[in-house]
Structure formats: structure tokens, C-alpha cells
Image (cartoon, grey):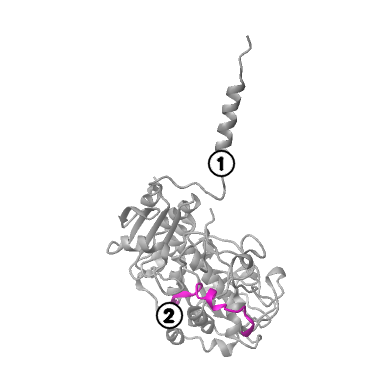
Amino acid sequence: MSDSTNVVFPDSDLDWSPTNDTGYPDRLAAMDTPEALRGLGAREFPDHLLIDPSDWKDAARQNDTHKTWAEDYRNRFTNQAPTHECTCHALAQNFEIAWNRQRAGKGSPIWVSPLSVYSEANTRQWGGSSMQRTVGICIARGFLPEHRGPNGVTEQKDKFPHTLHCTSGNDNEAGGPWVPVSRFPSGWQATSKHLKADEVINPRSYEQVISLLLNGIAVSVGRSGHAIPYVKVVWRNGQLAAMYADSYNVHRYDSVRMIKSGVGGSYAIWSTTIPDDWMKPVG
Amino acid sequence: MQPDYRLLILIVMAVLVMMRTTEDPSNPPVNPPGTVTQVTFIYEKDDSVPPRAVQDALRDLNEADILASAIDKDVSNGQGDMPEQYKIALDAAAGKLPCLVVQAGDKILRVIEDPTAKDVEEAAE
């Protein structure tokens, strides 16, 4: 069993910032405020989720023991390169984790398409999106599943009536051309309505972000020009860091300073719509 | 005198043919009455979350092919309605949250208030 309170990773994985534009420029980051997220229907942080800092390491060890980190409910990595879709890849991870957490495991996984939200968030393809524009779309009309699934590159395409590729990037089978919403498969809303964020939490402090993570709830944040999903809390040389599943097929880590810089644009999907039958997730 | 095995061989062959017939994949076997098929931890998100050990135990049930999940009492499907698969459990849980609802098909076997991980582990028994 891994010990989250004593991890090892290279300095190069801490506080990584992309040198190219990944889709979260300052002008869009400025739009991400707790007040704006509240306007989209997000709820305030429930007090009962707050964990006292003196108990953080104990909570982390319990998550290690019971495999109840958000990371333990995560399906897969995605790779956005070279697109500006980072906010939607961070959103997709958050959604899939919340879906699996309700299902108490990965027994009915669904792989959603970040592109299916990004196409509406930024109709011009390049330039990125704000965090809250994307989560607002997920609350309002939901994701489309992507073509691939855990069991093959056309698993979900063969199974569901409407799917889209994962990304407009060039990630092998996951990638495909840019698709405006007007060219989504006909009647796509009949599928996406089954894959909506139901309740979204609006954290307002660093302590709330860490408490959510220690409760096994993923937190998506935008910071330093890039959006990411935090999935675990770790300690390295006694210093707290948040681990994230970056949309470049790797884990990386943020220091306390970096975590604090992203609180304003952060959110956590607490619950999603749940199907009438897990075997038929989109009806 | 040599014993005549022909009748015995015919009986064995008939039994084998019958066994193959009952394995028809288009007609899967039905669980015997009383077999636990679904275990649902139901809670009020504004008050609590499923304890970590309970989540762990639910995952174990899933791996044993019992539909186990942890849902909020106000869960909804894509139409904004109560998901069909949880209607019976949610009805049984009313006024008892947090609780564990153990089902055999549509039949409620038991409702355990404030359940522990041990309750979840024993739910399949």
C-alpha cells in the first residue's frame, strides 16, 4: 500500500507550467470567481466536509487504506495536445470520478468527450475557455460519450446512439477533427442529458479544497495558464502537495502556493445524473 | 457373462443433453429467491458522506457481482426524475438516513440505519 504522507517525485513534476498555450489564459481566468460559479447554480461548501488541518494526514492514510481517493475512482488519462481544451479535460476527469464514486467503483465506467463540451465553450476552436463556462455547460446539457471505452476504440460508439471523439488533438485513436456543435450527430441532446453534473461545490478557500480532496472528491482548478484536476493530497519531505492527472498522460503536483492561486476558479462535481439502469447509462 | 452397459450409457447421454439445454446463454439462470442482488447506501449529502470503510466494502460487493452503490437521497436521472433502479430503495430509506438498503430483486430484505462497514460486508450473507 502506498503512503501518501511520504511520497517521492522529481522537482520537475512540482508546479509545472506549460510553456505553450493550453487554453486557460489570464483574460479567461479573470472571469472565474466564486460569485460567477454561484450564478451557474453551484452550491456553497458544506461545513460537514471540512477537515481540521491537524487531521489531514490521518484522513490521507485512511484513503490509502480504503482506496477512496478521487484518484482511485479515475478511469484513464487523456491527452489534449496540441489543443486548447485543458479546461474540458479537467472537467471530464472530475465528472467521471463523481460518476464512479456514486457507483462505488469502476463497475459501470463511462468515458466522456472533453471536445463535446469545448465545442460549445469556444466556438472558434482556439483560445481556450474559462473553468466556469465549461462546468456551466456540463450542468446545463451534459457531455457526449467518446467513441472509445475501457474495452476498445469503438466500444462506446457501437453501444450508444451519439458519441464524439475525445479531443480535436492528435492523440491516436482518441483524436479527430474539430467539430462545431452544429455538426454533432443529429439528436445528440437525447444522449448528453444523461451525463450532466448534478451538484457542484464552489470552494472558497485552500482549506476547503484540501478537505474536498481528503473526502475523495476531485477538485478542478485553473492556475498558471493551465486547468487540471486534483485527485489526491500527498506529502513530500513533509510538504503538502496536490497530485493531479494532467491532460498529457502524466501525474504532476502543485505546491501549497500554487493550490492557493487556483482557488478562485475551482469547483468539485459532487454528484452527477444517475441512469435508470447502470447497464444502459444513456437510456 | 458380460454386463450390458448400453442402458447406462443412454442414461448418461440423456443427462448431458439436459445439462446443455439449461446452459442456453439466451436464457440466463435466475437468482434463487432471497439472493441479494442490490445493496445501496443512501444518505443526505447536506448531513454526511459515506464513511471510507463503507465505500471500500461497497466496492468489494461490486466485485462479487452485487450491484452496490452510494447515492444521495435526492438523486435524479437525465429527465430530472428518480432513477428507476433506485425507486424501491429510496422509498424504503425514507426517514432512516443514512441507511443501507439490501434487496433481492424488487424485494427489500432489510434496511440498516447508520450502517457500518461490517454491515455492508455482511449484507450479502
Q: Amino acid at mark 1?
A: Thr
Q: Chain of mark 2?
A: A
Residue sitting at x 57%, y 74%: A144
Q: Is residue B99 above or below residue B13?
A: below
Residue range highlighted in magenta = A182-205
Task: Determine whether, in the image, residue A9 is placed left or right of residue A276.
Answer: right
Mark 2 closeness class: few <14, some 14–19, many ≥20 residues within 10 Å: many
Q: Determine which residue is flagged by label 2.
A: A42
- Same chain? Circles 1 and 2: no
- Front residue (pair A159, A202): A159
Q: Is residue A269 above or below residue B51?
A: below
Q: Position of residue A52 (x, y in %)?
A: 38, 68
Mark 1 closeness class: few <14, some 14–19, many ≥20 residues within 10 Å: few
- Front residue (pair A231, B62): B62
- Toward which corner of the image does residue A43 lie, by quadrant? bottom left
Q: Determine which residue is flagged by label 1.
A: B21
Residue sitting at x 62%, y 85%: A182
Q: Position of residue A283 (x, y in %)?
A: 51, 68
**Is residue B7 a member of the stretch shown in magenta?**
no
Q: Chain of mark 1?
A: B
Would residue A108 be visible to someone looking at this image? Answer: yes
Residue sitting at x 64%, y 87%: A127
Q: Amino acid at mark 2?
A: Ala
